[in-house]
Amino acid sequence: DAKTTQPPSMDCAEGRAANLPCNHSTISGNEYVYWYRQIHSQGPQYIIHGLKNNETNEMASLIITEDRKSSTLILPHATLRDTAVYYCIVRDSGNTPLVFGKGTRLSVIA
Amino acid sequence: GAVVSQHPSRVICKSGTSVKIECRSLDFQATTMFWYRQFPKQSLMLMATSNEGSKATYEQGVEKDKFLINHASLTLSTLTVTSAHPEDSSFYICSAKSGSWGTGELFFGEGSRLTVL
């Protein structure tokens, strides 16, 4: 079973920031938070991951609460091409695979 | 960045035939590959973990004799759907990690859409 809870869907206006929440209240100390997205009929695309510090890359920012029980993925300026299903996944640093939950379907609206 | 490639991207076959899907890591050696299946409007479901040179480990409920996985080299894993039936129609996706992967990203292929008539 997935260890995360995400809203099933969200809308965002084009050009605005998209803030996607994720709850992972049972996360353990050695588990990382990963975000992937899947555009229709394509394989998942890596976005970002983090352990406890906030992270930023060219695609997004990841904000993890101090207790690590929740996080937020931020797409600073959403475009129509960011319309996708976004998956928040927790996993440890070993050889375990990524286990996908239902994700959040983000619709960016012009 | 690292690339994982799948072939074919789409395949249509008749019921009862077998179909092979290839997953290749193009610029790194993949000691472990994972195979997922995705039905319409559902999430990805892990089918099996494939380690180079050893037998695959299948998830509960996945028939190992129906979904044959071979990981004979560090850059290629294959999934063969044997005696395919319409209920096997799905989007099959592979992912791969390098030997040193621990906390970095896992790379995914583009997916292979299987339609069984």
Image (spheres, grey):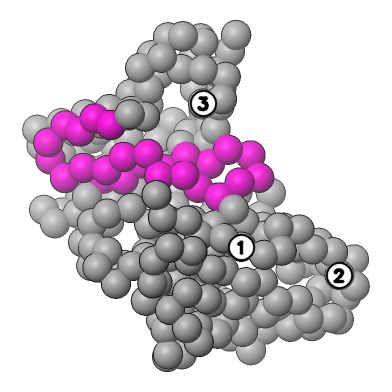
Q: Residue B53 versus residue A39: which sits nearer the camera?
A: B53
- List x then y, in percent, for residue B117: 90, 66
Corner quadrant of residue A25: top left
Mark 1: which amino acid? Gln
Residue at 50 percent of width and 47 percent of height: A44
Residue at far front of view: B27
Which segment is the magenta one? A33-57
- Pointer 2 local density, CA inside 10 Å: few below 14, some 14–19, many at least 20: some
Q: Is residue B1 magenta?
A: no
Query: Which residue is labeled 2 in the image?
Result: B13
Is there any visible trace of residue A4 in the rendered image? no
- List x then y, in percent, for residue A48: 31, 40
Q: Secondary structure at mark 1?
A: strand
Tag of residue A82:
3
Query: Which residue is labeled 1 in the image?
Result: B6
Q: Secondary structure at mark 2?
A: strand
